[in-house]
Amino acid sequence: MDPSSETSDDGGDAKGRVANAAHDIGGFIRAQREAAQVSLRQLAALAGVSNPYLSQIERGLRNPSAEVLAQIAKGLRVSSEVLYMRAGYLEQRPHSPVRDALLAETAITERQKQVLLDIYESFRRENAANEDRGDATDHKGGVPGGDRDNEVPHRITEVPPRQENEQP
């Protein structure tokens, strides 16, 4: 029997799925590298891998470890989570425009992205819990009946001290 024709219990071609995942992550890494205008040699140095190994990853011949993916993500300044999902190490979470924008942002670090995502998710969970309880929050300013975003702040204007020769 040809070993390449082995199938898993679910009837799918297990080796084909692995090859497709490797090709998908490799193509994605190559596209990200080219978009960032980083050479293969530069990315290999940043990721701490050899040029031939990175080339094999990009061509779908090798499937990188999670550790190598993290280093590649750092070198490309993209989210390691995105690479992990592409490689099949993580399940894909539901998309949201806010989440996608944060993950694509290059001006902040991976740690900062994760903190912002955690905060965002905690707000989403809190709002969902409030809706389930039937709270009277009308989502204006985050407090019942509040509209803090539209309130005009009270300003204190400082009056300059009078000069000696000024009349009251």
Image (tube, rainbow, N blue to C red):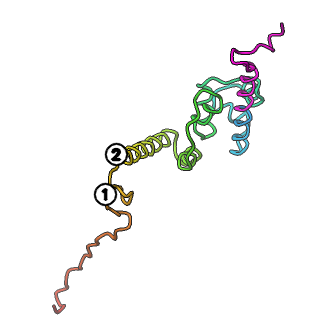
Instruction: Give the residues drawn in magenta, as a range.
Output: 1-25
Name the residue that disc number 1 marks.
144
Residue drawn 16% across the image and 91% down it: 168
Out of 152 and 26, give the one closest to the viewer.
152
* Residue type at tag 2: Arg
The image quarter containing residue 52 is: top right
- Counting every numbered tag in the picture gives 2
* Residue type at tag 1: Pro
Quadrant of the image for the N terminus?
top right
Name the residue that disc number 2 marks.
133
Q: Main secondary structure of the magenta part?
A: helix
Is disc 1 surrounded by few (<14), some (14 to 19) or many (20+) residues within 10 Å? few
Residue drawn 73% across the image and 37% down it: 30
Q: Secondary structure at mark 1?
A: loop
Q: Is residue 18 above or below residue 85?
A: above
Residue drawn 73% across the image and 18% down it: 11
